[in-house]
């Protein structure tokens, strides 16, 4: 039995993974047999182990991206300027004043590169070319100029774990396996019985390997069959990537959202995985060379520019992700952690009411570790997850206060805040009628898989509909006119029928609308930097359904009180302060359903 397992057990990655496996317990409770049985696990922890980080006390170094409010745009669904039913760059350009008025500082564009769109652009065919549906490079340059002219920044979505199988690199590898491009990807011979090299399954419900008879070899794809994983162990490939990234930075973009960046390093030998939700994930979710590659990326690209980076930490817990965002380690500025998107035991396909007490615990855990060497992100929605608002509400009357609760929460916590398009309007659950309406490769594959497992069309549809990523890709609702003012043509994906009442134009005019509340909350954050950098201290944390906290630094002290439930709640404590913003406009004797208030105490 190995002697250093107790040391390895202290690693955040070990703690979070054993937690996920339901095997986490104090060292003294492990039996020698259990330690032995976990040997493959200890090997992986050992390969990624880092000196344990001790939070650094003291003030945060102030940075533009720490104080920023970021806004994610899903270009296909934001605004169509030429009537083809597909959003585009000129459509985004036409809404820059809307974003500025909302208080946005960073615009994040989901992929706009040339692509066959098997996964809506996360399958890039040419990193230096704009997708014809979105416009031209001239349109992009004008958009970038327009963003900067309004004092905002623009970050690109960059997919470096895989490319489209139509990318010239992959095509060259197929045409001439002796070319250098062959080793830009991950190839293996199959097993003697003609089956794939290992038992890995893709994120999209299929085996993670394509067979190419012309080479009698298999190539790895962790996502769709047309998204081929890049071989980051190849220094020539990495050079090409750094050149391309610096090309975009030299064009004037301000940084990158890095797609599934934690998956780029795979464990040697690509061993079979333990059967599970995504079989094999333990062999690449936190690989042996990840930190090395992130430090090289920083050295060769990010540190050469006044850039901002946010990595998508896919399948990693918050504590493990800290090692990727410590300023002292010079890797990424921030990452996205999605551990709070669903409560334990639930997935995005589950229809349940999300208990906000779970979110409170998550926030207290992540906000609690004041650490001047680290910085967090705050995110509740994106293009891969159903609308958060629909997870936490059940009755129509709950929608508005609950939407405002999320706004006030997000704008009064420590971290770079992210809003997903439509979140500021209270856009929500789309009632799809039939599987033929799905456009998302993940949902379509899941649907097919369920049918192949004997489910009826109705059963498969009912399972997939709540969790299809089409949920949050439904076009933006600008007006109550036809197609919500998104397009004069036929939208590529249906809109939510409620655009007649839920739309930017009507909410603009209504002082009490969710849109105007987001504006007010963002304005409070900008006026009071204590809400960004101040110490976070919970108030009455033991009180169920109540979430209270103060934010304090030399410039001031603020108090936030929130009713996490759909019923009236007595205040556990009275704080003597000035009400700056309240989701019901005033503060009464008791807290109304989902009520959220921000006070200045000094
Ligand atoms: O998403 C990675 C990821 O975490 C998602 O695949 C997620 O696990 C899944 O959708 C949840 O059901 C990134 C992009 O955000 C996503 O749109 C891409 O499809 C994916 O990478 C592959 O590039
Ligand atoms: Ca268009």
Image (spheres, helix red, strand yellow):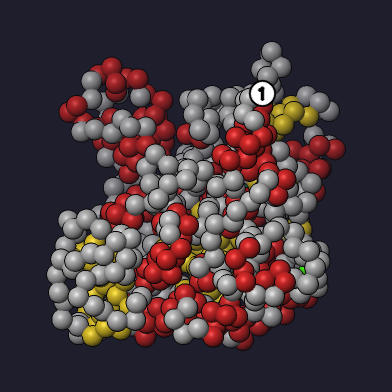
User: To which quarter of the image does residue 10 belong?
Assistant: top left
Picture quarter containing residue 586? bottom left
Residue at point 29%, 21% (across, down): 34
Residue 400 is drawn in which quadrant?
A: bottom left
How packed mark 1 is, by other alpha carbons closer than 10 Å (few <14, some 14-19, many 20 or more), is many
Q: Is 332 above or below relative to 58? A: above
Front residue of 44 and 348: 348
Please indicate whether residue 448 sits to the left or right of residue 391 in the image. Answer: right
In this view, 206 is above or below 499:
above
Q: Nearer the viewer, residue 371 or 90?
A: 90
User: In the shown orientation, is residue 142 left or right of residue 427?
Assistant: right
* Residue 406 appearing in the image: no
Residue position for label 1: 196
Q: Residue at x 66, y 62 (%)?
A: 495
From the viewer's perspective, is 495 left or right of 269? right
Most foreground residue, 384 or 50:
384
Q: Nearer the viewer, residue 4 or 158?
A: 158
Q: Outermost residue, top direction?
A: 193
Indicate the quadrant of ligand 2 in the picture: bottom right
Quadrant of the image containing the N terminus? top left
Which secondary structure lies at badge 1? loop
Side (left or right) of 522 relative to 230: left
Q: Would you say residue 393 is visible in this rendering? A: yes
Residue 487 x %, y %: 74, 70
| Residue 110 screen position, x and y as percent | 63, 61
Residue 312 x, y percent position in the rendering: 51, 54
| Image label count | 1
**In the figure, 519 relative to 164: above or below?**
below
Q: Position of residue 111 (x, y in %)?
A: 66, 60
Q: Which residue is at 39% across, 51% downward?
A: 354
Q: Kindly identify the residue that appears in the image at 23 percent across and 85 percent down.
A: 578
């Amino acid at each position: 039995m190995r002697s250093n397992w107790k040391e390895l057990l202290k690693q955040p990655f070990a703690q979070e993974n054993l937690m996920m496996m339901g095997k986490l317990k104090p060292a003294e409770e492990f039996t020698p047999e259990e330690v032995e049985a976990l040997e493959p696990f200890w090997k992986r922890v050992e390969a990624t182990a880092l000196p344990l980080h001790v939070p650094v006390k003291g003030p945060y170094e102030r940075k533009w991206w720490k104080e920023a409010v970021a806004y994610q745009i899903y270009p296909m669904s934001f605004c169509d300027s030429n009537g083809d039913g597909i959003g585009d760059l000129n459509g985004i350009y036409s809404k820059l004043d809307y974003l500025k008025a909302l208080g946005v500082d960073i615009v994040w564009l989901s992929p706009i590169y040339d692509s066959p769109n098997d996964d809506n652009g996360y399958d890039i065919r040419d990193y230096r070319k704009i997708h014809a549906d979105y416009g031209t490079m001239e349109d992009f340059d004008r958009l970038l100029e327009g963003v900067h002219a309004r004092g905002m920044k623009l970050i690109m979505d960059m997919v470096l774990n895989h490319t489209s199988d139509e990318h010239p690199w992959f095509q060259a590898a197929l045409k001439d396996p002796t070319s250098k491009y062959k080793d830009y990807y991950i190839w293996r011979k199959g097993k003697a019985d003609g089956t794939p090299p290992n038992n890995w399954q893709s994120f999209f419900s299929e085996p993670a390997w394509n067979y190419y008879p012309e080479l009698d070899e298999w190539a790895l794809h962790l996502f769709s069959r047309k998204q081929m994983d890049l071989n980051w162990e190849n220094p020539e490939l990495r050079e090409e990537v750094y050149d391309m990234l610096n090309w975009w930075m030299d064009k004037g973009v301000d940084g990158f959202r890095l797609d599934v960046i934690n998956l780029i390093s795979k464990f040697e030998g690509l061993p079979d995985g333990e059967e599970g939700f995504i079989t094999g994930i333990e062999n690449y979710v936190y690989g042996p060379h990840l930190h090395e590659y992130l430090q090289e990326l920083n050295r060769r690209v990010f540190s050469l520019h006044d850039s901002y980076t946010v990595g998508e930490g896919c399948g990693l817990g918050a504590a493990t992700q800290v090692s990727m965002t410590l300023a002292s380690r010079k890797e990424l500025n921030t990452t996205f952690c999605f551990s709070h998107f669903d409560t334990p035991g639930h997935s995005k396909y589950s229809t349940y009411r999300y208990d906000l007490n779970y979110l409170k615990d998550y926030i207290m855990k992540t906000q609690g570790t004041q650490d001047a060497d680290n910085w967090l992100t705050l995110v509740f929605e994106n293009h891969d997850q159903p609308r958060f608002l629909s997870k936490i509400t059940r009755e129509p009357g709950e929608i508005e206060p609950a939407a405002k609760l999320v706004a006030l929460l997000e704008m009064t916590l420590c971290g770079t805040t992210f809003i997903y398009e439509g979140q500021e309007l209270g856009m929500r659950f789309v009632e799809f009628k039939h599987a033929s309406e799905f456009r998302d490769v993940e949902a379509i594959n899941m649907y097919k898989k369920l049918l192949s497992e004997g489910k009826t069309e109705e059963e498969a549809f009912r399972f997939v509909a709540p969790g299809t990523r089409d949920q949050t890709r439904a076009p933006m609702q600008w007006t109550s006119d036809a197609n919500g003012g998104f397009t004069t043509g036929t939208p590529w994906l249906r809109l939510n029928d409620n655009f007649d009442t839920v739309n930017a134009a009507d909410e603009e005019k209504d002082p009490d609308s969710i849109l105007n509340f987001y504006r007010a909350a963002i304005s409070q954050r900008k006026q009071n930097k204590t809400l960004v950098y101040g110490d976070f201290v919970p108030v009455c944390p033991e009180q169920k359904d109540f979430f209270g906290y103060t934010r304090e630094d030399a410039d001031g002290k603020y108090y936030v009180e929130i009713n996490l439930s759909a019923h009236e709640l007595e205040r556990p404590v009275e704080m003597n302060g000035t009400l700056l913003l309240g989701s019901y406009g005033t503060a009464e004797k008791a807290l109304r359903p989902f009520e959220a208030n921000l006070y200045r105490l000094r």
